[in-house]
Image (cartoon, rainbow, N blue to C red):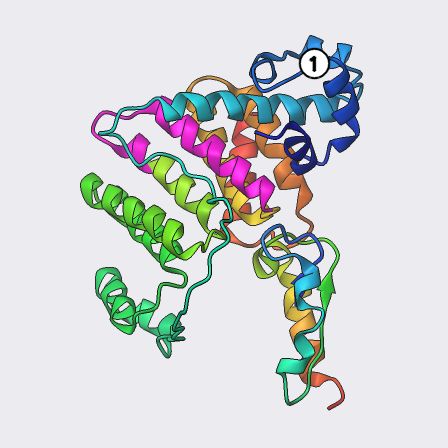
Amino acid sequence: MHSRRDGVSPVDRSVRHAVYFAGQYDRDVNPVAGQFLSRETPQSYVQALRDLMTGPR
Amino acid sequence: MNLASWLRSLGLEQYEAAFRENAIDNAVLPNLTAEDLKDLGVGLVGHRRKLLDAIAALRTDASAEATSADDLPAIDKPPSDVAERRQVTVMFSDLVGSTALSVAMDPEDLRDALRSTGTTMWSPLYLSGLAKIYGELGRIDDARGCIREAITGMETSKEIVFAAEVHRVAGEIALRAPQPNRIQAHAYFRRALTIAREQRAKSWELRAATSLARLLRDEGKRCEARDLLAPVYDWFTQGFDTLDLKEARSLLDALAS
């Protein structure tokens, strides 16, 4: 999970991170939040985790 | 300071040409007024407010740099990149179950446990939390020590994601000292706001705005406090049951009454 407006670690940095994961991988970009997703959009953050855990494997 | 970068950091790069054409440089910028901004073509009130806040932060930054060596450590900025080739060894380490341990252990013991792993990650945040506890206990020297260690750690590790919070806590410590230093607190809070805005860290911006708004309220500047905090609070659309947002709401309600 990465924020499009992250001012410390630009969102483009995670574009190619899939190569580091051997198992299931999903990249979720939050269009609103800033640096700390879990603090700034907690409900969206939790929902994204739930979707990942209950989604197809 | 690069004026164009500064405007970009505020999301107001459209005014770069107007600033340049009117010979606004680093010497003139800190003295710009609302009227000047109107003359420059900054028509929207929100844009003028944003610029005036940032200009005020520049002024307080300058005054903070003039504080004595006995005061809290100087407000830093991320170091500039310098090309260098070195052979390095990298070790990744962490403390298993640190969240559970943070509940079970004394904060100082947890800090020592974290140090024993050799890890520095998140240390600035832990240290700012410990500084806050020391401050509440009246152990101001210990609190200052934690802030110094946090700032030194950030300079070494370049882990700047907690810089805004470290500066905010430094401001709170300045207010809790036996002889509260409001000027220094202002400077630290404004610096925390600037860092949070540069990093687009809304959660840290909310905390910094709440701390500064509380200080402004205590100085009788209720309108200024409300104008500062309200737009930051209004950005949030969820998480209203979290402590930071509850505190901000409570302060805004008090400022409105």
Q: Is residue B28 above or below residue B102?
A: above
Boundaries of the magenta span: B173-199
Q: Is residue B215 above or below residue B239?
A: above
At 61% from the left and 59% from the top, the residue drawn is A37
Q: Amino acid at mark 1?
A: Ala
Q: Nearer the viewer, residue B26 or A25?
A: B26
At 65% from the left and 37% from the top, the residue drawn is B9
The 10 Å Cα crowd at callout 1, few under 14, some 14 to 19, many 20 or more, is few
At 60% from the left and 57% from the top, the residue drawn is A9
Judge from the rendering whether residue B136 lies leftward or rightward of residue B203; answer left or right: left
Q: Quadrant of residue B253?
A: top right
The residue singled out by tag 1 in the image is B23
Q: Nearer the viewer, residue B6 or A24?
A: B6
Give the position of the C terminus of chain B as an image quadrant.
top right
Residue A23 is situated, as x and y percent measured from the top left of the image, at: 65, 89
Kind of element beneath mark 1:
loop
